[in-house]
Amino acid sequence: MSEDFGPTFITVTDDEGNEIVLEFVDALEHKGQMYQAFFPAETEGEEDDPDNGLVILKVIHEDGEDLLSTLDSDEELEEVYDLFMESLFSDEDGQ
């Protein structure tokens, strides 16, 4: 994704009705499923805090629209998280 136009932000609503602003980081496909990674915008620069870390959502196609959803299991989350970490750190090493 080109950063010529600056970061991309989205607003999502959690199960309790709280709005959360997220900054898009990366996307990847794994086992036929598309995933997107975000950092909470309010905590930019604090990615090392485990409570404010990477947010991973999967893209679900429903009624012709792309929707973002939480992952189904801890195993799925761990597997996709590891893939994003590999991708993010390999990008940093290449710069």
Image (cartoon, rainbow, N blue to C red):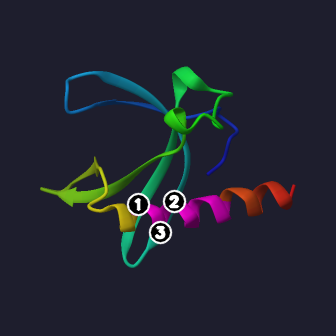
Rendered image: mark on residue 81? 2
Rendered image: mark on residue 79? 3
Rendered image: mark on residue 89? none
Compared across the picture, whether 71 is left or right of 81 comes to left
Picture residue at 66% right of the left edge, 65% below the top: 86
- Cβ–Cβ below 8 Å for labels 1 and 2? yes
Rendered image: mark on residue 77? 1
Magenta segment boundaries in residue numbering: 77-87
Within 10 angstroms of label 3, few (less than 14), some, or many (20 or more) residues?
few
- Cβ–Cβ below 8 Å for labels 3 and 2? yes
Percent across and percent down for residue 2 are 66, 47
- In the rendered image, the residue lying farthest to the bottom is 31
Camera-nearest residue between 84 and 50: 50
Q: Secondary structure at mark 2?
A: helix
- Cβ–Cβ below 8 Å for labels 1 and 3? yes
Name the residue type under label 2.
Tyr
Camera-nearest residue between 1 and 24: 24
How much space separates mark 3 and mark 2, taking CA atoms? Answer: 6 Å
